[in-house]
Amino acid sequence: MHADLGHYLAMARRYDMRTRLRQVEATRAEIVAAAHALLDGDKSHSLTLDEVARAAGVSRATVYNQFGSRRQLLAAVFEDQGRLIRYDRVQAAMALPDPRAALAEGLRELARAWSSRPKAIRRVLALAVVDPEIAELVARYERYRRAEIAALAGRLDDAGLLGHGVSTSEAAAILGALTGFSVFDALAFESGKRAALQRLVHTVFSSLGVDPQPK
């Protein structure tokens, strides 16, 4: 009898813990979604804990308890933004075995990613100019992106695909500059997404001296 009662209580505690964990995860997701809504909205927001809390319909204390600090909240939002734009597809494209194909497909996937949530990305980059916490996080993700770009530049060099006189470091710098959001956004503003991608592909391949077609 006592053993049955102990088993029942243990099961009840596990169920209660799972329920609380699901509630915590749901609240966390709602807060992150609220931050995305602020970034996608028409009004300017600085993503303070108070602003996000109001948008999520929770208290500031709840936001703080979920994330511990504004910086951790912003990190969660930016990481989720990467999920929303499917940046994993960019990484998969750049990892294709053929470096020439990796470059071409990587550019197409970058154009798709940058086109998926342009308003939110613009807002983040604008906030980074005046907000040190956001600037730090943006710089961190840019370093990751540049590292992946540099790896692709090295593969292009190893395969003998770079033009005469273009070193790996120069190729990495060119790729890093041309494949950022701001360049694609400017091209898309002038000519639309499809034409922007075509111009980007032409500019990148020409600047690196890479023949777009295998010989």
Image (cartoon, rainbow, N blue to C red):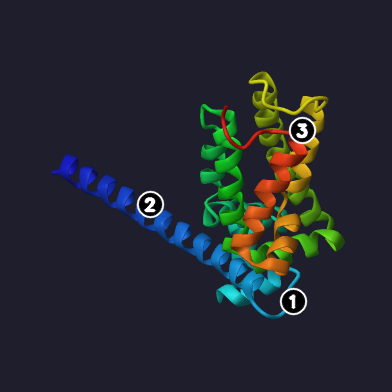
Badge 2 crowding class, 10 Å Cα cut-off, few under 14, some 14 to 19, many 20 or more, is few
Q: Earlier in the sequence, mark 2 or mark 3?
A: 2
User: Label 2: which residue?
Assistant: 17
Q: Amino acid at mark 3?
A: Ala
User: Label 3: which residue?
Assistant: 171
* C-beta proximity under 8 Å, tags 3 and 1: no
Q: Amino acid at mark 1?
A: Ser
Q: Earlier in the sequence, mark 2 or mark 1?
A: 2
Q: Amino acid at mark 2?
A: Met
Badge 3 crowding class, 10 Å Cα cut-off, few under 14, some 14 to 19, many 20 or more, is many
Give the SS element for disc 2. helix
Give the SS element for disc 3. helix
Rendering coords of residue 42 (x, y %):
67, 80
Badge 1 crowding class, 10 Å Cα cut-off, few under 14, some 14 to 19, many 20 or more, is few
Closer to us: 47 or 94: 94
Judged by depth in the image, the label closer to the viewer, 3 or 1, is 3
Closer to us: 27 or 32: 32
Rendering coords of residue 169 (x, y %):
80, 28
Q: Which residue corresponds to the image point at 73% horizontal and 47% vertical from the top-left?
A: 203
Closer to us: 140 or 208: 208
Q: Can residue 48 be seen by looking at this rendering? A: no
Q: Can residue 27 be seen by looking at this rendering? A: yes
Rendering coords of residue 103 (x, y %):
61, 37
Q: Is residue 122 left or right of residue 9?
A: right
Q: Which residue corresponds to the image point at 80% horizontal and 37% vertical from the top-left?
A: 173
